[in-house]
Amino acid sequence: MTPDHLDHPALGRLDWDDRLSWFKGQMPLDDGSTVEITLNPFSELLHPYPDRLEDPVEFLDRSVSTLSDLAGKLDAMKEYAADRLLDVYNDGWRSSYRQGDWLELPALDRGGFVAQLALRSIGVDAGRECEVQFDDGGMFAGHAVFVSTDASGAPGGLRTLRLTHQHAHREMRSPHCCIEPRTEPVE
């Protein structure tokens, strides 16, 4: 049987979500805040997932190592998103119809774009691939920005997803990690 939780000195308690087959908890950040994390021990396997985690200590050690490596790459992930989305924002999204009004938001330079992205959650799978969710800071009308990595930690994918009040009632998942919807309506 997979344990109902794991404890780690730095991460604290990680609770098993039997419905989604991953552990969920909080990771402390250098600034004193925390970020939600999900750790999926079975993501490399086909369904049905096994009914037990063979080596929880090894899995947790590998996940903590991946999270530690990733912590130093978060700025690079924001830069990766800026490389791919800055022109999308400046050429289209900054001038848009939102909630009944036509809005013309200011154009952003690369630094301004990166500054708008706020870390929301991190998911790690068994293969050390990650997906990091950033709030968009209003640049894309409430769409979240997701940057995924390969097992080496190099950014390798990007997508945006509209998270509305309707999404707040269910969790969504990608092949690699948990995507935590906003709990408040997007304005």
Image (tube, grey):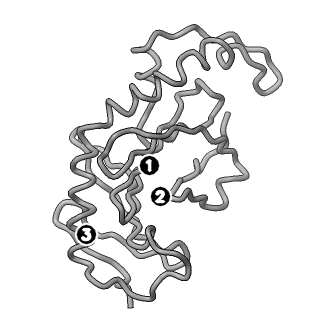
Kind of residue sitting beneath label 1: Glu
> How many marks overall?
3
Labels 3 and 2: the sequence-earlier one: 3
**Image quarter (top left, top right, bottom left or bottom right) of the N terminus:** bottom left
Could you tell whether 98 is left or right of 31 in the image? right
Q: Which disc is residue 177 wearing?
A: 2
- Residue position marked by numbered label 3 in the rendering: 60
Labels 1 and 2: the sequence-earlier one: 1
- Residue position marked by numbered label 1 in the rendering: 131
Using the image as rendered, state which of residue 157 and residue 52 is in the foreground: 157
Labels 3 and 1: the sequence-earlier one: 3
Where residue 35 sits in the image (x, y, percent)? 36, 49
Q: Secondary structure at mark 3?
A: helix
Q: Residues within 10 Å of mark 3 (few under 14, many from 20)?
A: some
Image vertical order of residue 144 relative to residue 45, above or below: above
Q: Secondary structure at mark 1?
A: strand
Asked if labels 2 and 1 touch by Cβ distance under 8 angstroms, the answer is yes
